[in-house]
Amino acid sequence: MKNKTIRMEETNRSHLVQDPVKLVETYPKVPLTVDCVVFGFEENELKVLLIRSDLAVFDGLWSLLGDNVGDNEELDDAAYRILRERTGMEDVYLDQVRSFSHPARHPGGRVITVAYCSLINIQHHQLKKIDHELHWHNVASLTQMAFDHFEILTHCHKWLQKRIQEHPLGFNLLPDKFSLRELQNLYEAILNHQLDRRNFRKKFASMGLLIDVNEIENDVPHRPGKLYKFDFEKYEKNKRKWIGVDF
Amino acid sequence: MKNKTIRMEETNRSHLVQDPVKLVETYPKVPLTVDCVVFGFEENELKVLLIRSDLAVFDGLWSLLGDNVGDNEELDDAAYRILRERTGMEDVYLDQVRSFSHPARHPGGRVITVAYCSLINIQHHQLKKIDHELHWHNVASLTQMAFDHFEILTHCHKWLQKRIQEHPLGFNLLPDKFSLRELQNLYEAILNHQLDRRNFRKKFASMGLLIDVNEIENDVPHRPGKLYKFDFEKYEKNKRKWIGVDF
DNA sequence: TCTTCAATGTGTAAAAAGTACACAATTGGT
DNA sequence: ACCAATTGTGTACTTTTTACACATTGAAGA
């Protein structure tokens, strides 16, 4: 049967497109952007890095860090570029979340965007120049944004809530050395609910991904906690064990 | 502090873009397509619906069902339209997976695509006209396809493997009435490994999403199994209970 | 109709993971 | 020296997951 269909194909070669370039030239084209939801963590609150919208219709509103996709640029590369240009950071955690394509999402007409989620360590990060157009916002207290960016943010937040329970991503938001309390505060801020302290610690202890750096917190007005760092090497080696399918 | 930044904004109104339409006109545009990975299940094998590529460079290779995105069409709608046009089916399960943007993924030049995963019941589905360009392929035995479609298929298959363990999606691939054996065969085909029969049944029994229709299989050369149907209503009501975050 | 075959249908014990909960130890501040 | 606040730890209970065996049913064929 396979032979039969192949033979049929061979007799119908006239239907085949010989010049793919000409074909693609006939394709409709749309403006495509990448928007980055850049999460940070400070003062026990989940933050998102926003820029003031430069559209008059959105006067006073904030928007995600976004840009057009370059001519022969991968979407991932565009997202990295946006982060580099805006924050000066390299090697940040970045993941594509999904596309948003409502025809009226941009007041200037049809623009489709691909949303990325990024996790960065606010301490490492000094906004390139002191840029009054860029600001870290508390995610929990945002209610509206430019474009459909509030919807995108909400979606990415949910995505992160789910993701962080299957992958140890939180470390990207913390300083190199952190206490278990800070780690728990981070999880509570992202998930927006309280966790049991002992069970939380037990869980992370059982994963064996924390390295005791033999230091303790200072500047706390009570018994200081031990500091740990994340064992990225061990994580990379045993990824499959924790997250199952490589996905 | 918020007041301060707002005041500054107000003094800089001259920087604001007054005409978003003109702005968007300056954006680069790219050809954008939607590709659907249409899964089916037949003869205990996971199948994917493919169409013969009409590009000469891919002579003999198969590709996913795809099309351009219409002028003011949402991506989701484009995916539904593709399925409707190709298979005549409405109300199919469909979910956006992710975008693929390698600059060389299309021999005709830069084309970005958004991949969708669709699950359909092969029995319900009669290919609109008997279309020799469309064919159900065994996923496990595919090794190459046109464009980067094999990569997309592989990614969507992994996505489905993960998804099916958190959401009861498998029912979309089965006839209305099915036996537990068929359900298990489906899971084994998707996950590509054997499952314990008793534990599998126990798990589904405990979910309480199966309605006993008081019928049994026929045409089996041994003791026939009971037939069940999926309780979509109950699932919709208790979604949160099973899948946690609505995501 | 009796036997054989190939599946269905069911239960239990053990292990692992998750949940709830309390108290002693340490540090800074007074 | 004491107090306040938080760290660090263990145990019992519940739930979920895993491993595993045997009687039952219906079809097919002798």
Image (cartoon, coloured by chain):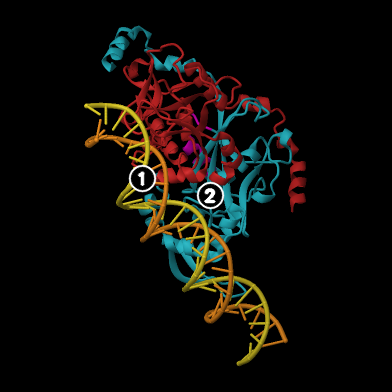
Chain colours: A red, B cyan, C yellow, D orange
Compared to residue B219, the image places residue B148 above or below, namely above
- Chain letter for the residue marked with disc 2 in the picture: B
Specify few, some or many for label 1: CA neighbours under 10 Å numbering under 14, 14-19, or 20 or more.
few
- Looking at the picture, tell me which residue is in the foreground, A212 or B35: A212
Compared to residue B102, the image places residue B48 above or below, namely below
Give residue A77's position: percent from left, percent from top. Answer: 57, 24
* Residue appearing at x 51%, y 54% in the figure: B170
- Looking at the picture, tell me which residue is in the foreground, C28 or B78: C28
* Residue appearing at x 39%, y 36% in the figure: A181
Determine which residue is flagged by label 1.
A196
In this picture, residue D4 sits left or right of residue A239: left
Q: Is residue A27 visible?
A: yes
Give residue B214's position: percent from left, percent from top. Answer: 45, 71
Compared to residue A25, the image places residue B94 above or below, namely below
- Looking at the picture, tell me which residue is in the foreground, A180 or B113: A180
Quarter where residue A185 is shown? top left
- Chain letter for the residue marked with disc 1 in the picture: A
- Per the image, label 2 sits on a secondary structure element best described as strand
| Amino acid type for the residue under numbered disc 1 | Asp
Question: Is residue B81 a member of the stretch shown in magenta?
Answer: yes
Please report the bounds of the magenta region as a residue range.
Answer: B69-83
In this picture, residue B24 sits left or right of residue C21: right
- Looking at the picture, tell me which residue is in the foreground, B215 or A120: A120
Q: Can residue B209 be seen in this view?
A: no
Determine which residue is flagged by label 2.
B119
Specify few, some or many for label 2: CA neighbours under 10 Å numbering under 14, 14-19, or 20 or more.
many
Question: For the N terminus of chain B, which image quadrant?
Answer: top left
| Amino acid type for the residue under numbered disc 2 | Leu
